[in-house]
Image: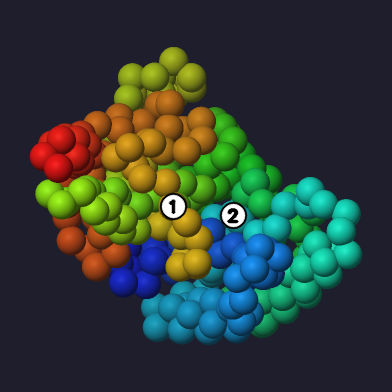
Amino acid sequence: MKAIPLYEKRALFIPSIKAVVIADLHIGIEYELFLNGVNIPSQTNILLQRCQDLGREKKATTIILLGDVKHIIFHSKTKDYHTALRKERKDVYFFLSVLAEEFEVRLIKGNHDGGLKSKKENVSIYGSKGISIGKFGFVHGHAWPSQEVMESDIIIMAHTHPVVHITNSFGYPITKPCWLKGRFAEELYKKYKIERKKKEIIVMPAFNPLCGGIAINREGILGPLGKIVDLAHTRIYLLDGTYLGYVHTLHSFHRNCSTSK
């Protein structure tokens, strides 16, 4: 039973279910950036090609999307905003349609995915409580997972867009996307009536490099699961697989470097 990070690819491969797992695509983020004066070409074809390449490389039959497939959250009635929404909707439909021609697509909704639908036969869309497949539980992370998901041996989540923040001796901040691997705290068993056994949680980096991030050694894990994870003893890995240490170690390093300015 393995969940193998594809470190340089910001994706995860699970051989036992022939699935590639991808988190936080945020298709359409470039349209929102454009509304704020930043002009970036559409990234949809690039994201699609990366997903297809990963699936083919690993001979996967399934692509699991851990939420926030789309980006724009409706909050404006301006003409430009509606135009951005239409473009995003078109891109998301195209992305899912093409991906589903080659793979089974299983999509867990994230907090950016309100109103997301697909009529494609090979696309299954699930709610925020997540799904379990074998011994693996999959959830976006902005809402409490189901009991079934939390009974899984390995829980894989998105949502946080984890990065590690380090301040060097000159006072300059360095921020790097990262992976997190950890265990749950005692609070898990207060929230869920489940068997006491070792469980691992994996927090995936955002697949889309345009996304910002949450400094895990300063702000912790976003969402309700952050309340029941043993954050201090959660391990941090850079995108290339470099092991940096535990969160509490990096927190101390950040603090010590900051005070040495």
First in sequence, mark 2 or 1: give its number: 2
What residue type is disc 1 on? Gly
Name the foreground residue: 154 vs 108: 108
Name the foreground residue: 37 vs 211: 37
Residue picked out by circle 2:
67
The quadrant holding residue 18 is bottom left
Q: Helix, strand or loop at disc 1?
A: loop
What x and y, as percent, mark residue 117?
Answer: 78, 60
The answer to whether 184 is drawn above or below residue 128 in the figure is above
Q: Helix, strand or loop at disc 2?
A: loop
**Circle 2/circle 1 CB separation < 8 Å:** no
Point 24% across, 32% down: residue: 232
The answer to whether 225 is drawn above or below residue 87 in the figure is above
Point 61% across, 39% down: residue: 129
Badge 1: how crowded within 10 Å, few (<14), some, or many (20+)?
many
The answer to whether 248 is drawn above or below residue 208 in the figure is above
- Give the numbered dot on residue 213: 1
Point 59% across, 54% down: residue: 67
What residue type is disc 2 on? Gly
For this orientation, the residue located farthest to the top is 190
In this view of the protein, can residue 192 be seen by the observer? yes
What x and y, as percent, mark residue 188?
Answer: 41, 24
